[in-house]
Image: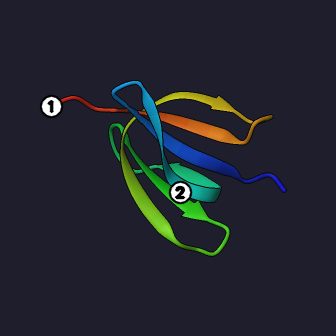
Amino acid sequence: MCEANAYIIKEGQEHLIMKSVDILEPSGENVWKLVDIFGDQKIVKGCIKGMNLVDHKILFEAQSG
């Protein structure tokens, strides 16, 4: 399996946004569309802080303001 879990970092803590993310697409400036293996979708506002594909993690940093 090649899916990853997506997290957003707020106040130094990782918070799970979505499990089993299969598709990550840009949807505007610092806006991302996540699609999981079941076709469920979420929109995330923030910038990508990092990706660790060995650990199956996508990290977003919340936008301030």
Between discs 2 and 1, the one toward the N terminus: 2
Q: Residue at x 63, y 56 (%)?
A: 21
How many dots with numbers? 2
- Please indicate whether residue 30 sits to the left or right of residue 5 in the image: left
Q: Residues within 10 Å of mark 2 (few under 14, many from 20)?
A: some
- Residue under label 1, please give it: 65
Q: Position of residue 15 (x, y in %)?
A: 46, 43
Against 51, residue 15 (above or below) is: below
Q: Residue at x 53, y 34 (%)?
A: 59
Structural distance between the alpha carbons of marks 2 and 1 = 23 Å
Amino acid of disc 2: Met
- Label 2 element class: strand
Against 8, residue 36 (above or below) is: below
- Please indicate whether residue 4 sits to the left or right of residue 32 in the image: right
Q: Quadrant of residue 19?
A: bottom right
The residue closer to the viewer here, 13 or 27, is 13
- Label 1 element class: loop
Image disc number at residue 14: none
